[in-house]
Amino acid sequence: MAGARGWLLAIISASILCAVADSLMPAGPVKRVGRLVCGLVLLCAVLSPAADLDLAGGRDWLEDYFAGLEAGRMALGERVDQEMKVIIEQEYAAYIVDKAAEMGLTCAARVSCRAEEAGLYVPDGTEVAGAGSDEGQSRLTRLIEEDLGVPLERQVYYSEEELP
């Protein structure tokens, strides 16, 4: 606040000095040169805080700001990825339940996904409860293996009451 007060005082002082000098100057080329000098004095008064700028401190602040932005962007990206993973897992589970219903089976499913190099989430394992008879379970096992690419060893089946 003191710096702004001093800056305004310098501008006001320079303005008053220039006004007095302009009124005392004789007309003609001397007055034109005097006005040029007064304009330069006012310009110096207005730009005087620029001489006190800490450019290195500003650069450090800007670098910290951009680093914070990057960290925030990374955290947001990770959060979005986790939320997308949950949604994709739920969609795969709904797919299994729908396909089982088409086969005449009633079940509940849970799917776990893993991220591939391209950033896509693919099914990695399934848990199915209440798949019915052995024949219904084997048909569902083949469907999951063929459609979703989940091998038999990563498919777990529970009775209706056992699903954790």
Image (cartoon, grey):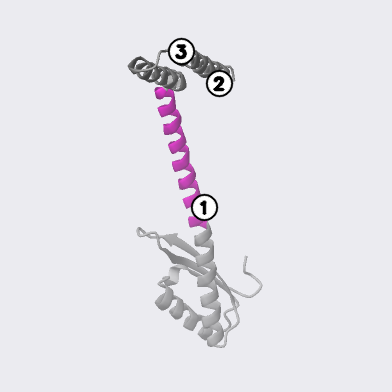
Q: Residue placed at 47% from the left, 66% from the top? A: 125
When the figure is inspected, residue 150 is found, relative to residue 119, above or below; the finding is: below
Q: Can residue 15 be spotted in the picture?
A: yes
**Secondary structure category for the residue under label 3:** helix
Kindly identify the amino acid type of the residue bearing the numbered disc 2.
Ala
- Where is residue 104, by image quadrant? bottom right
Q: Residue placed at 35% from the left, 14% from the top? A: 30
Residue, far left: 29
Write the start and end of the magenta stretch as one range: 55-82
Q: Which mark's residue is nearer the viewer, 2 or 3? A: 3
User: Chief secondary structure of the magenta span?
Assistant: helix
Mark 1: give few (<14), some (14-19) or many (20+) Cα within 10 Å. Answer: few
Which of 124 and 131 lies nearest the eye of the viewer? 124
Q: Which mark's residue is nearer the viewer, 2 or 1? A: 2
Say if the magenta span includes residue 80. yes
**What separation in Å lies between label 2 and label 3 (alpha carbons)?**
26 Å
Q: Which residue is mark 3?
A: 21
Kindly identify the amino acid type of the residue bearing the numbered disc 3.
Ala
**Secondary structure category for the residue under label 1:** helix
Quarter of the figure that contains the N terminus = top right
Does label 2 or label 3 sit earlier along the sequence?
2
Q: Residue placed at 53% from the left, 72% from the top? A: 93
**What separation in Å lies between label 3 and label 1 (alpha carbons)?**
66 Å
Q: Are marks 2 and 1 in contact (CB under 8 Å)?
A: no
Q: Can residue 111 be spotted in the picture?
A: no
- Where is residue 145, by image quadrant? bottom left
Kindly identify the amino acid type of the residue bearing the numbered disc 1.
Arg
Q: Which residue is mark 2?
A: 4
**What separation in Å lies between label 2 and label 1 (alpha carbons)?**
44 Å
Q: Which residue is mark 1?
A: 79
Q: Which mark is residue 33?
A: none
